[in-house]
Image (cartoon, rainbow, N blue to C red):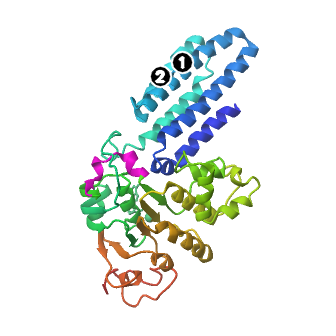
Amino acid sequence: RERQAYVSRDLQEVISGIDTVKSHAAEDREVHRVSGTLRNMVDARIRNTMLSAFSEYFRIGTMSLMLIAVIWFGGNEVLAGAMTVGDFVAFAVYIMTFAPTVNTFFAFPVVMQPALTSAARLRELFAMQGEPGALAGAGGIVPGTVQGRIEFSGVWFGYSEDAPVLRDARFVIRPGEAVAVVGRTGAGKTTLINLILRAFAPKKGTITLDWRDLSTLDPRWLRRQISIVSQDLFLFHTTIEENIRYSRPDATIEEVVEAAQKAQIHDDILRLPDGYRTVVGERGTRLSVGQRQRIAIARAFLKDAPILILDEPTSALDLQTEDLIGQTLRALVRDRTTILISHRPSLLELADRVLAIEDGQVRECRGSGAASCLPPGCPPSPDLFMGCGDAPLWHGA
Ligand SMILES: Nc1ncnc2c1ncn2[C@@H]1O[C@H](COP(=O)(O)OP(=O)(O)O)[C@@H](O)[C@H]1O
Ligand SMILES: [Mg+2]
């Protein structure tokens, strides 16, 4: 029963951390982890039953073997690349939908019920990947190098037909450049990022990376080229070390520590009861938002991807903590193509140029600094738009 709880905890974690899982192209790893826990649960049940009665053991054993066969066979297929994760889950669900019939036959509905629920939830989870046109199957071009030039040409996008979020967005981000994107809440800043990550596909127009249409690129490869630090980091229920390593599973402990040092979280980690081995996340030691944010930055340092996306990385922080984070971000931004979404003038200083989104269109703010995007008469403040009313953004531009 306790192991059953582990399964649902793992699944819950994968579901709430789905953005993290997907942005690290870690779906396979997660399916493996969850099926591992599932298998442990089944194993434990087999052992208990053996003690009570051999005939019962035989029945459950049959069921469990089926389940293990499914996981083993499917898992290997997925690893070998012969089957997609989606196919595997669908396959597992079919088997498990069929299984209760067998179960009734044995008049012993033990093992399959929780597995059924888990499988249904897994399927739900991976069905979320199926945004139209976004990730139509794996595969695609895997370029050898990345310059980091990103171009939107005539991009139209909306989550529904009648409410376009981007209307004919066109702009270029040059390799190695740091570009800030500003705009009021709901203007479409995060949407822009989602399109770059191919979480969604444009309705019209194209987005290119180094002159190649994103839709021709291998999505997993694409996500390996991009690090994201957003408002609040999702932590898995595991050690700090593993949480940092999530962005690069083959990293050594030395590399993890180095990334933590760069992100200025190393000293905080050493102060925790078990240092890097401290278990955090849902039931572990709680970290402050500022600490979690620096773990996210450590992940990005470790991943060392050529493209960096910062989506309001300090909006959950107070001004002092923001100052500290700002310093560590400066090092991260250097030498990378960076898209920085923020309203905080102190952070916007990291950007070479500022783009503003309004009414679905993206325009460059002329003049120097983020303030040049603002309507005239906006007082300087810790938040760009504080006290600006609803006046259009590029009046003075
Ligand atoms: N997954 C979604 N489904 C439907 N509508 C969405 C979704 N995400 C964002 N939106 C809508 O799209 C618009 C732009 O949102 P978003 O890009 O998150 O804005 P910003 O990041 O600039 O605050 C908003 O009107 C928002 O309600
Ligand atoms: Mg947003």
**Whole-percent x and y of residue 234?**
57, 54
Image position of 153 with respect to 111: above or below: below
Q: Quadrant of residue 103?
A: top right
Q: CA distance from mark 2 to mark 1?
A: 9 Å
Task: Name the residue at the bottom extreme.
Answer: 377
Image position of 78 with respect to 196: above or below: above
Q: Which residues are magenta?
A: 211-224
Q: Circle 2 — which element? A: helix
Kind of residue at disc 2: Ile
Task: Name the residue at the top extreme.
Answer: 55
Question: In the image shown, does 25 or 124 lie closer to the viewer?
Answer: 25
Nearer-N-terminus badge (2/1): 1
Quadrant where the N terminus sits is top right
| Other residues around mark 2 within 10 Å, as few (<14) / some (14–19) / many (≥20) | some
Q: Can you tell me which quadrant of the image ligand 1 is in? A: bottom left
Residues marked 2 and 1 touching at CB (< 8 Å): yes
Q: Is residue 213 one of those drawn in magenta? A: yes
- Residue at mark 2: 95
Quadrant where the C terminus sits is bottom left
Asked whether the viewer can see residue 162, the reply is: no
**Whole-percent x and y of residue 136?**
32, 41
- Does residue 361 appear to the left or right of 305 in the view shown? left
- Does residue 146 appear to the left or right of 333 in the view shown? left
Tell me: is circle 1 under 8 Å from ligand 1: no
Image position of 162 with respect to 81: above or below: below
- Residue at mark 1: 66
Kind of residue at disc 1: Met
Q: Circle 1 — which element? A: helix
Mark identifier at residue 368 = none
Q: Is residue 193 one of those drawn in magenta? A: no
